[in-house]
Image (cartoon, grey):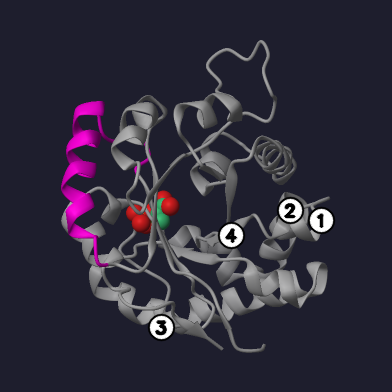
């Protein structure tokens, strides 16, 4: 693949952690800590904290988002939340197809696909998560599983829409296990994803799409992972809950944009 430049994105996914008070305190502490970083920071906070934290983040490098949304514009869907509600509250992106949603709430690729299209329609940037289980990896099915997730979760998108999407490769065996993928493994899969995108949407689009890695990223393993050509940043769970560890990872990237080959 040609030489090109992509920005580095460090995204935090707080899951079902942090009250409003804790969220505000976290952001207050984080802002001065990451002033010199060159990466862009995405924070997926609980729905309840979005509007409160959105005003705190104005004029900072923090972009606020949500962890899920419904695939309908509005309707009788008790307990659900729409993309436009999230956008109006201050969200600019949304995580879709996280493995916890897929496994615990039985979300299919087709459901994720409908949400991706709705998010794009509304103007929320989707971060689409894909990843294999340890059994699938051990059985040699990783590429088959990822191909199917990519094909069906992104079905029907044109090149312009695809360029708005971020991917997150999150091997399920690495999430919350303290066992991050080896940098070479992450690179191999990210390279595969980029080649898939190039085949489907053209090289120009494939080079624009940021592919984040997620799964037990910590300050001590983030540096080597970020050195990989096709690792454009991270989606971080556990380590995004502490200002120190999250700030440290964000600050790994200082100075001009990383040059990728
Ligand atoms: C996640 O759930 O998206 C995640 C990557 O979690 P952790 O960083 O804790 O492995």
In the rendered structure, the answer to whether residue 247 lies left or right of residue 15 reads: left
Residue 136 left/right relative to 120: left
Measure the C-alpha gap from mark 3 to mark 4. 18 Å
* Residue contact at pointers 2 and 1, CB within 8 angstroms: yes
Q: Contact, CB < 8 Å: mark 4 with mark 2?
A: no
Q: Residues within 10 Å of mark 3 (few under 14, many from 20)?
A: some
Judged from the image, the secondary structure of the residue bearing numbered disc 1 is loop
Instruction: Give the residue pinned by disc 3.
Output: 227
Can you tell which mark lies on residue 161?
2
Q: Quadrant of residue 145?
A: bottom right
- Based on the picture, tell me whether residue 33 belongs to the magenta stretch: yes
Residues at marks 4 and 2, CA–CA distance in whole angstroms? 13 Å
Across and down, in percent, residue 243 comes to 19, 52
* Magenta span of residues: 14-36
Q: Residue at point 28% right, 73% down?
A: 252
How many numbered circles are shown?
4
| Depth check, front residue: 93 or 237 | 93
Q: Residue furthest front?
A: 59
Q: Quadrant of ligand 1?
A: bottom left
Secondary structure of the residue carrying numbered label 2 = helix
Q: Position of residue 251 (x, y in %)?
A: 26, 68
- The residue under label 4 is 167
Residue 32: assigned label: none
Q: Secondary structure at mark 4?
A: strand
Q: Which residue is mark 1?
A: 158
Earlier residue among tags 4 and 2: 2
């Amino acid at each position: 693949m040609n030489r090109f430049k992509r920005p580095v994105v460090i995204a935090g996914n707080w899951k079902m952690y942090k009250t409003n008070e804790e969220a505000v305190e976290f952001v207050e502490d984080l802002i001065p800590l990451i002033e010199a970083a060159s990466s862009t920071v995405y924070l997926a906070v609980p729905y309840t904290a979005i509007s409160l934290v959105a005003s705190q983040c104005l004029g900072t490098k923090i972009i606020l988002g949500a962890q899920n949304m419904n695939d309908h514009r509005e309707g009788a869907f008790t307990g659900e939340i729409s993309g436009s509600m999230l956008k109006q509250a201050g969200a600019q992106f949304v995580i879709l197809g996280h493995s916890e949603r897929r496994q615990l709430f039985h979300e299919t690729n087709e459901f994720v696909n409908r949400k991706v299209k709705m998010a794009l329609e509304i103007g929320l940037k989707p971060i689409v998560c894909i990843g294999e289980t340890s059994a699938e990896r051990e059985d040699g099915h990783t590429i088959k599983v990822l191909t199917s997730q990519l094909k069906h979760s992104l079905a029907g998108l044109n090149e312009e829409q695809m360029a708005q999407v971020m991917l997150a490769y999150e091997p399920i065996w690495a999430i919350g296990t303290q066992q991050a993928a080896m940098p070479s493994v992450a690179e191999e899969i990210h390279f595969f994803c980029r080649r898939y995108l190039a085949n489907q949407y053209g090289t120009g689009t494939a080079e624009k799409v940021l592919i984040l890695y997620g799964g037990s990223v910590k300050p001590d393993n983030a540096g080597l992972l970020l050195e990989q050509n096709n690792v454009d940043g991270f989606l971080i769970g556990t380590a995004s809950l502490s200002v120190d560890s999250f700030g440290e990872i964000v600050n790994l990237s200082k100075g001009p944009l990383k040059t990728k080959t």
